[in-house]
Amino acid sequence: MLSVQRRRVYRLILKNLEIVEPKEKIDVVKDDPSGNIFVEAAVVGNSDYIVSQDKRLLKLKEFRKIITPEEFNKILSFVCCRIMSFLFLQQRNLQYYCPAARFADIS
């Protein structure tokens, strides 16, 4: 079951989704050219990440930030924790602590 914070982040993502129509072809997925449509959409949509389990897309990490769903969940946990900690700090003026930060590699 998803935490309340994570559900809020998912709703925020869904609310901000944008449908794009790529105008130019990009040919970077040599093993499976059908995967190029995801890269084209990410470029046109100026996305921060492509989330996929496709091994051929994951090989292209240097082209774009292409990550697994598990990696994306770590990022979401980190972001949720930072947001909640920030809000808590504003209300209480206490020291910042985020245990999820140790597990999230967002570089």
Image (spheres, rainbow, N blue to C red):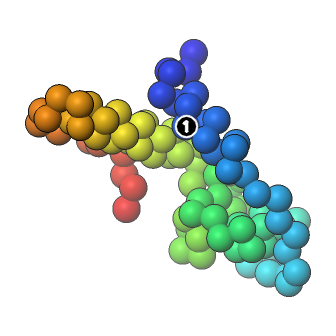
Query: Viewed as shown, does residue 80 lie left or right of 85?
Result: right
Q: Residue at x 45, y 46 (%)?
A: 75
Q: Quadrant of the N terminus?
A: top right
Q: Can you see residue 16? A: yes
Count of numbered circles on the image = 1
Disc 1 packing (10 Å; few <14; some 14–19; many ≥20) = some
- Residue 81 in the image, given as x and y percentages of width and height: 35, 35
The foreground one among 93 and 38 is 93
Q: Residue at x 28, y 40 (%)?
A: 86
Quadrant in the picture for residue 2: top right
Quadrant in the picture for residue 44: bottom right
Q: Is 59 located above or below residue 69 in the figure? A: below
Query: Viewed as shown, does residue 75 lie left or right of 64?
Result: left
The foreground one among 48 and 92 is 92
Q: Residue at x 48, y 41 (%)?
A: 76
Q: Quadrant of the C terminus?
A: bottom left
Q: Amino acid at mark 1?
A: Val
The foreground one among 26 and 95 is 95
- Residue 66 in the image, given as x and y percentages of width and height: 59, 61
Query: Viewed as shown, does residue 53 lie left or right of 9?
Result: right
Query: Viewed as shown, does residue 91 lie left or right of 37?
Result: left
Secondary structure of the residue carrying tag 1 is: helix
Of all residues shown, which one is farthest toward the bottom? 24
- Residue 26 in the image, given as x and y percentages of width and height: 80, 81
Of all residues shown, which one is farthest toward the front? 91
- Residue 63 in the image, given as x and y percentages of width and height: 60, 76
Quadrant in the picture for residue 82: top left
Q: Can you see residue 39? A: no
Q: Residue at x 71, y 62 (%)?
A: 56
The residue that disc 1 covers is: 9
